[in-house]
Amino acid sequence: MKNILKTGAVYFGIALFSVIGFSVAHGYGGDPCKIGVTPPPGGFAITSLSGSTVTNKKIELRLSGGDAAYARVSNHSDFSLSIYFPSSTFNSVLWNLTSGYGKKTVYVKYLNKCQALPTSPVSVTVNYVADQCTIGVTPPSGGFSVKSNSGSTVRDPNIILGLAGGNAAYVEIANNVNFTGSTILQYAPTVKWILPGSYGYKTVYVRYLNSCQKKPSATVKVTINYVRS
């Protein structure tokens, strides 16, 4: 009888050890806070979906964290002022860069479901630049101006205008102060222009524009006397 009980106890011990071993091996009985993050096939990574050069402080990130449950994201290598994001957001994380233009680096660590056992950090660097459409034209040293290269008195309505537009990319020209029916041309030191209507004094109005044809400069003008031949 004692041998039977002893044998049964041995079998029970072996079975119990097998169940516990199987559970631990498959994560059922292990402490999840002590299980690290498994990387994806290409390794842990972070990508800027907004591109390598951005004009907006808010960018979109894609995180590759394997079986991570969380990502810790920061603008600082010491992960100060960091924010935790759940894995459900990894395909599209909206993130604010620090203020001021220039190169900005975003750092990420991946963590398990207990926000523990962080991976080594990965990072991505983007160049935050000003939106050129919001930047006005810089005038030349003598200020914006326009003149008639054909002279102050002309006998032909087809004239040549001399322009001083600084770093302008475009110039807007009109025969009226409201710029109604104006023409926008690529900036050049000289452009051709046609005076309107019959003989008399004609005023041509000019303003200089940036590369997006926006942010016009102050208006400058030139008056020309169109006379009979």
Image (tube, rainbow, N blue to C red):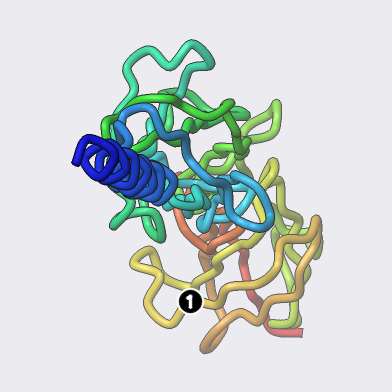
SS for callout 1: loop
- Residue 55's spot in the image, x, y percent? 50, 46
Which residue does the image show at 51% across and 64% down from the upper left? Answer: 203
Q: Residue furthest bottom?
A: 197
The quarter of the displayed image where residue 152 is located: bottom right
The residue drawn where x is 35% and y is 25% is: 116
Horizontal and vertical percent for residue 204?
Answer: 54, 65
Instruction: Identify the residue position indicated by label 1 in the image.
Output: 182
> Where is 75 relative to 64, above or below?
above
- Quarter of the picture containing the N terminus is top left
Residue occupying the point 60% across, 28% down: 102
Instruction: Tell me residue 166's x, y (percent).
Output: 69, 41
Q: Give 169 or 227, whichever is nearer the viewer.
A: 169
* Crowd around label 1: few <14 · some 14–19 · many ≥20 (10 Å): some
Q: Quadrant of residue 46?
A: top right
Q: Is residue 166 above or below residue 205?
A: above
Q: Of residues 143 and 3, which is closer to you in this image?
A: 3
Please indicate whether residue 35 sits to the left or right of residue 7 in the image: right
Amino acid type indicated by mark 1: Ser
The answer to whether residue 69 shows anywhere in this view is no
For the C terminus, give its image quadrant. Answer: bottom right
Q: Is 189 or 65 nearer to us in this picture?
A: 65
Where is residue 66? Give x, y as percent: 50, 52
Residue 166 visible from this viewpoint: yes
Q: Which residue is nearer to you in this view: 66 or 13?
A: 13
> How many marks overall?
1
User: Residue at the location (55% across, 37% down)?
Assistant: 128
Asked whether, in this view, residue 200 is left or right of residue 31, the answer is right
